[in-house]
Image (spheres, rainbow, N blue to C red):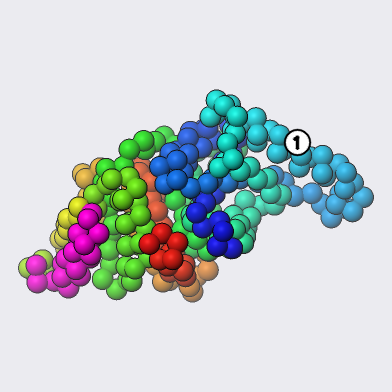
Amino acid sequence: MSNNLNSIMAFIPQNNEGELVLKEALYFQQTLGMRIFVLNVIKAPSLLSRKFQAKNVESIENEAVQKLNNFVKNVIQKEIPKNIILRVKPGNVVPTLIEESQRGGYGFIVVDKSKSSFKGALHWNKIDKFISQSHCPVLAVNKDFPVREIKKIVIPIDISQSMKKRLLWATLFAKKFGAKIQIVSALNINIDEKKSLAFKNAEKIKHLFWDQGIECEVKILKVHKQKKYKAILKCLKEEKPELVIIRTHQESIFSGNKIGKFVSKIVHGCNMPVFTVNYSQNPLDSIFF
């Protein structure tokens, strides 16, 4: 499984809007120096078709592979290099993505979170379900707001959550993209922010990044009676980072298909790419550091 951990998988519908998603995925793939598996999910054949029309089923799958090949070549305007691998899988999209996340061992999987009406687009609740059950991180991008340079990464933190996996990924992204990091925490108690546990924890994390040679700053938000996600979204709009890294909430353990309102609002409420790290994922120390 570990041989694909230096790889990205991207679910790309083959149309004009899918072209924008592929270009976004390729930007991350090229900058990170990873391979990319471009995935298309086609309708699964019936049991009868598999049994009595096996050649026809094979023909359909081969045709889908050829169409995907033509689509990718048209986007990159050259022969497909060895670090771009094409995959066609029969089935329903979300279960297929979850299965691939478990079996493939990818570094992360890219999906489009745009509010699109095109065929094959994932509705927000399906994206949430996939994020909650994925066995690897998920990068949700917006085709309408492409990122071609990452200068600032924002990490919203909750003092009740572990930071280790986010620190690993944030360190990787910051070094590869030459970006600075901003740690943001929403404080809903009326005390001096510098006396808060949130500030003290954020300062410790800041110094960990400094030790890695990464520029980092801390921002504490006073939310009072405001919802925390609203304060974070307002901050993101003001700060204009090119990437957000967030950890999914523990409640997904019990719900099975939800990532929690806070995470869902951040993923779908901001236009920039959001990188979600699930509570169950293994740290990648041995891969990147």
The residue located at (45%, 61%) in the rendering is 287
The magenta span reads 194-214
The residue located at (44%, 66%) in the rendering is 286
Q: Decide: few, some or many residues near mark 1? Use Cα within 10 Å; few <14, some 14-19, many ≥20.
A: few
Quarter of the image where the C terminus is located: bottom left
Q: Quadrant of residue 171?
A: bottom left
Percent from the top left, x then y, of residue 274? 38, 50
Where is mark 1, residue-wise? 63
Q: Specify whether residue 128 is in view.
A: no
Percent from the top left, x then y, of residue 119? 60, 38
Q: Is residue 136 magenta?
A: no
Q: Residue furthest right?
A: 52
The residue located at (54%, 49%) in the rendering is 9
Residue 285 sits above or below residue 41 on the image: below
Percent from the top left, x then y, of residue 23? 47, 35
Under circle 1, the secondary element is helix
**Front-most of 58 and 83?**
83
Q: Amino acid at mark 1?
A: Glu
Q: With 76 as the anchor, is 213 left or right in this view?
A: left
Percent from the top left, x then y, of residue 269? 35, 48
The residue located at (28%, 45%) in the rendering is 178
Quarter of the image where the N terminus is located: bottom right
Residue 193 sits above or below residue 107 on the image: below
